[in-house]
Amino acid sequence: MSSPPGDVTRLLVAWSKGDRDALEDLIPVVYGELRRIAARYFRHERPGHTLQPTVLVHEAYLKLVDQDHARWQNRAQFFGVAAQLMRRILVDHARTHRAAKRGGGMTPVTLVDVAFASPPRGVDVIALDESLTRLTSLYPEQGRLVELRYFGGLTIEETGEAMDTSPATVKRQWTVARAWLLRDLKGEAKL
């Protein structure tokens, strides 16, 4: 991630303690990173997507700053929550879009590109969300890991920091979670 981790953490902790000036200072520091995460995701979205990266960032950011009772601990936690919010926004948008089209035009999800932490073109975000919800109900840590890596664009190291676990554990769980999701999306997962 591009902004200095110490600056973000310091501002988040100050904001958590009620310092509104810290929030004002935080905006320009984290905006670029949130925009990068959203742009990365949309680079792989279907052509003609009606939700734009800037709108996604603004919606997520508004929800993030509306969390008055959040106790921010560090940058990885903040971007992890941002990834979760972006996921919810994308899924809600996809559901609205699907309802408008009455289920037409959706392509199946493949996880070939997910091995490289890149969403494939034309991802059926709803199918992925449903599968991720099933994974999370069985294996909460793996679900959170997928959310951070796939929707948040966090690296192995950043995911480890956000989850308070080692990069080696993140790599192992990432491999297992991807395999589980692939099987589930193909209808082969055993619950």
Image (cartoon, rainbow, N blue to C red):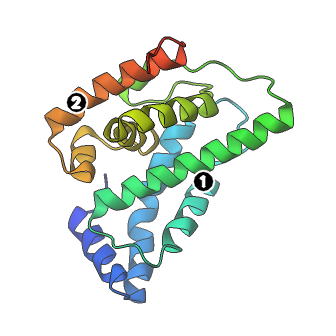
Q: What residue occupies the far front of the structure in this picture?
A: 191
Residue linked to disc 2: 171
Q: Is residue 45 above or below residue 148?
A: above
Task: Mark 1 or mark 2: name the one nearer the start of the chain.
Answer: 1
The location of residue 22, given as percent across then percent down, is 37, 83
Residue linked to disc 1: 56
Kind of residue sitting beneath label 2: Lys
- Residue in the foreground of this view, choosing between 189 and 174: 189
Kind of residue sitting beneath label 1: Leu
Disc on res. 66: none
The location of residue 87, given as percent across then percent down, is 54, 46
Residue 87 visible in image: yes
Left or right position of 40 against 79: right
Left or right position of 42 against 95: left
Mark 1 falls on what kind of element? helix
Badge nearest the viewer, 1 or 2:
2
Residue at point 52% right, 24% down? 120
The location of residue 70, given as percent across then percent down, is 40, 73
- How many marks can you see? 2
Residue at point 38% right, 53% down? 80
Cα separation between marks 1 and 2: 28 Å
Quarter of the rendering containing residue 79: bottom left
Mark 2 falls on what kind of element? helix
Left or right position of 183 against 107: left
Residue at point 61% right, 50% down? 89
The location of residue 191, given as percent across then percent down, is 44, 21
Determine whether label 1 and label 2 are within 8 Å by CB.
Answer: no
Residue at point 73% right, 34% down? 48
Mark 2 crowd level (few <14, some 14–19, many ≥20, 10 Å Cα): some
Residue 111 visible in image: no
